[in-house]
Image (tube, helix red, strand yellow):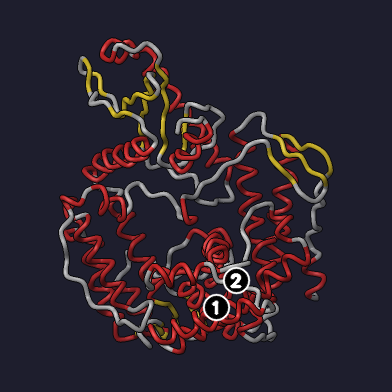
Amino acid sequence: MAQKDKIRSIEKPEMPIGTLHGQDIDDFFNKSIAYHKEVFENTLSEYEPFDLYSNWKTFVRNLDEFINIPFEIDIDDKKKYLSLGLNLMEENNLPNFKYILDLLENKFNKKISQRFMQIAMMSSAINASYIKCGVYNLQGNSLNLDNIENAIDFFQSRRLYYVSVLPLIPQMAKGSKKIKYIDLLNFFQYCIDSCLVGITSAYFKLLINKCISDYEITSDGTIAKGNFDFSHLESFFLEPERLSLLDQLELRPDIVIQKTMLPKSDNKIFSFSETANAMSLYEGAFHKYKLDKSSIFKELSLFLYDIAIYIEDDFNIVIEETDFEKISQKYKSLKLSIQTTDYFVALNSKAPFQKVGNYYFSTVVLLTRFVTNTLSTSLLKNRTFQIHSGFVFEDKVASILKKFNFELTDIKRINRKEFDLVTIKNGEIYNFQCKNNYYDISTVDLDYNKIAKLNNRLCNYYEKALTKEINRENLIKDKLGIQQIYHFVISRYPVITRNEKIINFNRLENWLIDKNLI
């Protein structure tokens, strides 16, 4: 079948004008997902796999440097870096570009300076194109590429998609077409936005439709807007964690064991030593839970030792197929690579290696992501960790409430009845239950019906918890001598509900502002 015919094998669904409900939402967005999956697969199929994979892996590396440069330079240079306009046709931006290029070359090396310039040029071209074609307006959000600060947010919001494409290229790219690296985004950014971002957006609309009985979407034929919004990510577009490394370091410094860190080269942004240091950070931060005694920690340590000889330029990892198979057999509990054409599998995978030809490729950034995710996941099975993570979450919520001038009472137990955070604001009681249940509906899975059932089950549990608090609220009223009381549940992992008494943690500060509790 010709490429043109393959693209048309699933007809593009036309967004109807008017209001969609129930089954109409299911029908349209299921068709939309199927269509955009096929378009993306057919687009990749035109390209020569090794050439495209090499360019894509280079782009992900350069992008990670672009995003992380602000953490490597001093505060004054950081301000200049983030405010740098990316319109290369604007002469006033050119002196600032030269300053940043010289800064990066002097602090790091010329290659990093050159890689930055390549991302800047690519960003400038996409920004001009998106403005001209009205793409930003269609996307309906504030993300753009007009300066580096905004570009970092734009790319960070899509970084998971870029990484997810890496394992798909060797399986889907079967053609002979080649493009220059500098043109990569010109050929693929709109495809990423319309297909991959579009698939995720459609998925969450399907999920919301199963969770919210009165959900509806109004469309003018071009832009569709639902009557319920849901955000599953936290600041900087990060996925929620039951207890993150940063939270442990910030909120439980007294139980953190300081470990010796390997030095990092001053002229590099990433290096293999950071992967080893990530192991040490986790070992010290979660020493209380005997992480270093776990089989998975020991296996990861041995695995990193074994692959160290395959590291090139302190960043790329290249392993010949026969050697990789031996390593995989030795560390069977570690999911090191996937070979799939399923977009949803690739999206949810943290496997660090991709097979292209007779070699397996990775980078220290992908490896570090794999290590931290593996260790975080292993901690979830630890009963002591499960209990203590709840207390840390309470402290995290309390710090936010304190910032908004809530008075934190010392009430934790009355007549053997336990409470989480009982606070006072404007002479009224606000009783917050902090729920750190490990139940994450942010994983994008085509079986949205299953995820919706889990979501609704958790919401029902939260509503029963609220009823329980109402039934015993006189204990708090009598203790504090205040009659007006409000009860809320704060959920660590976001849920989909219209119950205004259930607050998703990633929305807590916005909720406080919206309710004028500042």
Q: Is residue 5 left or right of residue 75?
A: right
Q: Which residue is mark 2?
A: 85
Residue 466 located left or right of residue 226: left
Q: Is residue 333 above or below residue 141?
A: below
**Coordinates of residue 203 in the picture (x, y in percent):** 62, 49
Q: Is residue 193 above or below residue 204?
A: below
Residue 103 location, x and y as percent? Answer: 44, 82
Q: Which of the two marks, 2 or 1, is nearer to us in this view? A: 1
Q: Compute the Cα span from label 2 to label 1.
A: 8 Å
Residue 351 is labelled as none
Q: Secondary structure at mark 2?
A: loop
Q: Which residue is mark 1?
A: 96
Q: Residue 158: give x, y in percent of width and height.
A: 56, 62
* Secondary element at tag 1: helix
Question: Percent from the top left, x then y, of residue 141?
Answer: 65, 52
Labelled pair 2, 1 in contact (Cβ < 8 Å) = yes
Q: Residues within 10 Å of mark 1 (few under 14, many from 20)?
A: some
